[in-house]
Image (spheres, rainbow, N blue to C red):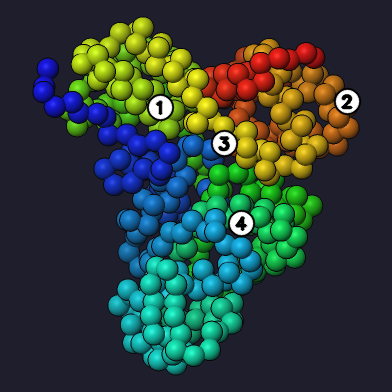
Amino acid sequence: MNARWIPPKIIVGSAATGDYYYPRTEIVNEIWDELEKGNFILIAAPRRVGKTSIMRDIEANPRENYKVIFENIQAVKSEIDFYKTLYKLILNCLSTSKKASKWFSSYIKTKQIIEISTSGVKFENKVPDYLHEINNIFRELDKSTETIVLLLDELPEVLHKLDKAEKKDEAIAILHQLRAWRQTDFKKLQFIFAGSVGIHYVVKNIEGRTSSLNDLIPAICNPLSKDEAKDYIKWVTSNNASVQYDTERQTQLLFKIQHYYTPYFINLMLGEIDKNAKKRNNPTITEQDIDQAFLNVEKSNEHFADWKKRLYDYMPKSDFNFVNNILIHIAHRNSIGIQAIYDKAVKQEKTIDYMDMIHDLVNDGYLTETTEDSQKYIFISPFLKAFWKRNNPIYNE
């Protein structure tokens, strides 16, 4: 055994970039193809599938004639702040554009801009109307200029926070302005949106409908297939990692994770296995080591508590109580059928939109339909099931 212990090249929690990013070529190419058609994209995926990592990859590897910039806009607190952030991102793109350099130099002087940075734009005198300036910029840009693509992460959270802060009118104004841009001739400005909670649920709560999103093109970001998951394990250990996985150990590890193969859940297991093997100073692992790692991850609230907190934060109390009861039922009974869901909806007076909430749980990566019966739902991950059961140890129907 080598004297220096080498861990697998994994990262848990933060977005995977650079050497830690496992290329998702198919979805990235699909997104670029839609952008080249002039479309605006909504990356649709459950939590922890890797949306942010995909967006950072698009930013790092733009196609020709595109300027791309990523921003997590979670800190935006008002409509004006939203347009201020977009203005900053647009100017950062234009500041590195050779094709727009002559026009942009003149623009900076006209607006008395003294500094453009990732933290913001500074003016010598009066701060402008940011929305007005964004519209003016894109009226002036000619066909020879690169197309600017803004990758906005956590837009649903911004809209939700505005709604909770009694700024629903501002959230609606942002939605309508984004739609207006999508329907104008401003072809030099495009957007990709993503978030860690379903935007359709948030928008429906704000507007009572989701028509503001109907013209967005969904880019479906699925978990890894079983073969891709095996390839991923090889990929993260290809740095001569101390712990290696033959075909048998790969199969055993993926069996524990079941069918929801995302880098995040695989990394939790790989990291725990590596930590325990290093403690023993023995890189050879057994099926029992994989079983123990699963139990250790399963008991770790820090990885899964946020899944419940997000439901609590984003949903009205009565909706949360309903879906939480569904999740507790599945945690204790392994699955739930349509009739049982309806019975719970009747008790909690949720019969009008109860299946919408179930579909949201599916889309956001909590539940999935069972393969043998589309009328039954189970947890998409055994880790989530164990968390909900441990968090709610007593259940009486």
User: Separation of disc 3 and disc 4 at Cα?
Assistant: 17 Å
Do tag 4 and tag 1 residues touch (Cβ < 8 Å)? no
Q: Is residue 78 above or below residue 126?
A: above
Could you tell me which secondary element the residue under label 2 belongs to?
helix
In this view, the residue in front, 26 or 245, is 245
Residue 306: assigned label = 3
* Residue name at image x 33 percent, y 79 percent: 99
User: Separation of disc 4 and disc 2 at Cα?
Assistant: 33 Å
User: Separation of disc 2 and disc 3 at Cα?
Assistant: 27 Å
Three-letter code for the amino acid on which mark 1 is drawn: Leu
Q: Mark 2 points at which residue?
A: 347
Q: Mark 4 points at which residue?
A: 158
Could you tell me which secondary element the residue under label 4 belongs to?
helix
Q: Give the label, 2 or 3, closer to the camera.
A: 3
Do tag 3 and tag 4 residues touch (Cβ < 8 Å)? no
**Which is nearer the N-term, disc 4 or disc 1?**
4
**Which is nearer the N-term, disc 3 or disc 4?**
4
Q: Could you tell me residue 31's position as x and y percent?
A: 45, 51
User: Separation of disc 4 and disc 1 at Cα?
Assistant: 29 Å
**Which is nearer the N-term, disc 2 or disc 3?**
3
Would residue 259 be seen by someone viewing this image from the given angle? Answer: no
The local crowd at label 1, few if under 14, some if 14 to 19, many if 20 or more residues have their Cα within 10 Å, is: many
User: Separation of disc 2 and disc 1 at Cα?
Assistant: 38 Å
Q: Could you tell me residue 365's position as x and y percent?
A: 58, 33
Three-letter code for the amino acid on which mark 3 is drawn: Asp
**Which is nearer the N-term, disc 4 or disc 2?**
4
Q: Name the residue under label 1.
A: 268
| Quadrant in the rendering for residue 180 | bottom right
In this view, the residue in front, 109 or 45, is 109
Could you tell me which secondary element the residue under label 3 belongs to?
helix
